[in-house]
Amino acid sequence: MIQTEVKPIVAARIGEKFARLKAQHKKALVTFVTAGDPTREITVPLMHAMVKSGVDVIELGIPFSDPMAEGPVIQRSSERALALGVSMADVFAYVAEFRKADSVTPIVLMGYANPIERMGLNVFGDRAKAAGVDGVIIVDYPPEESHELLKTMDAVGIDVVYLLSPTSTAERIEMVANVGRGYIYYVSLKGVTGAANIDTDEVASAVAKIKAKTNLPIGVGFGIRDGETARRVSDVADAVIIGSRIIQEMEKSSPDAAIKNVQTLLHSIRAAMDA
Amino acid sequence: MQMYDLPDARGHFGQYGGVFVAETLQAALLELKIEYEKTKTDPEFIAEFQRELKHYVGRPSPIYHAKRLSDDLGGAQIYLKREDLNHTGAHKVNNTIGQALLARRMGKPRVIAETGAGQHGVASATVAARYGLECVVYMGSEDVKRQAQNVYRMKLLGATVVPVESGSKTLKDALNEAMRDWVTNVENTYYIIGTVAGPHPYPMMVRDFNSVVGKECLWQMPEMIGRQPDAVLACVGGGSNAMGIFYDYIGREKVRLIGCEAGGEGVETGKHAASLTAGSAGILHGNRTYLIQNADGQITDTHSVSAGLDYPGVGPEHAWLKDSGRAEYVAVNDDEALAAFHRLCRIEGIIPALESSHAIAHAIKMAPTMAKDKVLLVNLSGRGDKDMATVAERSGLQFYCRASCQPAAKS
């Protein structure tokens, strides 16, 4: 057997972050915001502020015209960003700007396949890496359709994070366990982002099933709206993922208070998780 | 004759098609794929499907020689496949019957659908009533306004029509919203997609159910003229009526296949819905296909006088047929379609749907350049009753608009 000389470049930040948290007996708090929403100027300060409030990993949404898997809150955020003309180049620029002051917090870009294919996988991979991106979640690139993506991202050292859901079969759990990088995003509800309530008992049994197949950390998202739920989820998973709730907080805040209100929300969630 | 056996097991037509959907939908699509594979060869299912097509839809639909139109043009003979005579007024019902029967077999009491012009919504509401299923139809709020009559038809048939306010408020957004409903209610809900797009197995399944159109032409044309036509023409939005009539002709390479897209105000103006003629490859609504998109890969607004063609994507099999050269695709402008609409009304006494008028317009363009013994077969995919208000408005006429339906303060 020939030993391959070139190993995939390890996307260090995500793995290191989870290892460090594990050593500290802490769980990761992962937040999602859409790049350039509600204003272009808010994104980088918001990212730093979230880190200060105890966020461990930031998922930054790439705006898309047809976000099929999102509920109304994230749809609106995508529409607002597109109305401001936020492009892929802007998304990279925000990440590069953030990296000037933060070289440890992992950033995962989350979006849909079309804008990435349009740019070209190679160009996307190179530019994302150069900006300081650590991972990607492409909602409509399931493992079966993303061989090229995986190959391209492995080559530049960007983790491809895949999703699993309550309806995922044993075969699909195995497949994602085999190809997944960084962490696994467990979608805790049947439905779209921002949907109602989460059943933590169901989550616990699903996470156990996935854990049996992989050593990757497991993040749980969809339907986590407060500290209490976050705490119960963090008892059974490695990471708590919150998106719609943060965007809602910004929607109901005045522009000046948006960051402060998001921080207050995240402080309470972090405190509940660490209690 | 060549063997044609696309798509492959995972729904690919060459580089097009596939299953580009979130994990949350994978299990449902797998269940559907397995159920459809089992069902499509089940003699009992086939017999019931055919019985419904015959007694409920009124199939086979006739082919009509548009002799006065042909004589007027002085060239090739134009024949019309009369899908407009089907129950509900278009080809769409062929597919909704097939899928509703499948939903019933799968034990799903609730069906959902997306609709643009409202024809697929009406066809879905119709079969839901026929089989006793709950029906929810998603429709862009812009289309709800443009197609008020079809909205009322759906309500009469017992369906709930949900206006979609997101994005461009048209067909593509209705499709997004229907997908979201399906993800949420997948256990009791069957999603009836109305065109040959979306994730596998939909493009294949919708084509198969509509292929009855071409299958009938295969025996009807020899009965009428002793041979197959020289070309088959159909309008293409998502492309279900075109795939329906093209499919059985794909292997008969002497027959030209011509898809007519919505050129809107002209492809050069950017206000059109001609994804094959003027778009580029990308991923939307679960499949890789030709799309109308900007340089950033955002799906852009489309335009067509016919709501049913107003869609930024197209079925992946059409993308493959275009690249392989087996089919040709042309863009027909709003004005050309409208002119064809009026001409068919006046000279043949047939009021065609604005969608189908695009294919008729191209036949009108082609016929005079061809010899009189050549034959063009046009899929007259639907009737134009639903388009009365649109056509009247374009002609500057007030059509059946009582005071109560006028916007309140018009200055």
Image (cartoon, coloured by chain):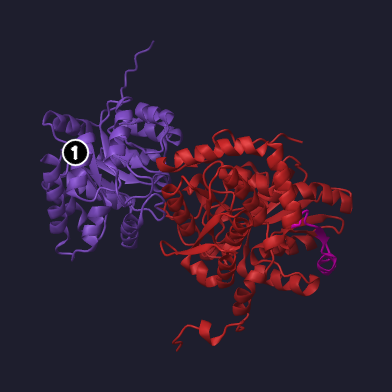
Chain colours: A purple, B red
> Which residue is the extreme one toward the bottom?
B411
Q: Secondary structure at mark 1?
A: strand
Left or right, B258 with respect to A80, comes to: right
Quarter of the C terminus of chain A within the rendering: top left
Q: Position of residue A139 (x, y in %)?
A: 38, 43
Q: Is residue A144 visible?
A: yes
Q: Determine if the magenta segment contains residue B70.
A: yes
Residue A42 picture location, percent across and down: 20, 57
Chain name for mark 1 = A
Q: Quadrant of residue B330?
A: bottom right
Q: Amino acid at mark 1?
A: Ala
Left or right relative to A132: residue B216: right
Image coordinates of residue A247 in percent, x first then y, are 25, 56
Judge whether residue A176 is colored magenta.
Answer: no
* Residue A191, x across and y down, in percent: 38, 48
Above or below: residue B74 compared with residue A8? below
Q: Residue furthest front?
A: B132
**Foreground residue among A267 and A68:** A267
Residue A163 sits in which quadrant?
A: top left
Quarter of the image with the N terminus of chain A in it: top left
Alpha-carbon neighbours of circle 1 within 10 Å: few (<14), some, or many (≥20)?
many
Q: Which residue is mark 1?
A: A28
At 17% from the left and 60% from the top, the residue drawn is: A258
Is residue B335 toward the left or the right of residue A257 in the image? Answer: right
Residue B22 in sight in this render: no
Q: Which residues are magenta?
A: B58-77
* Residue drawn at the location 29% of the way across and 29% of the way down: A208
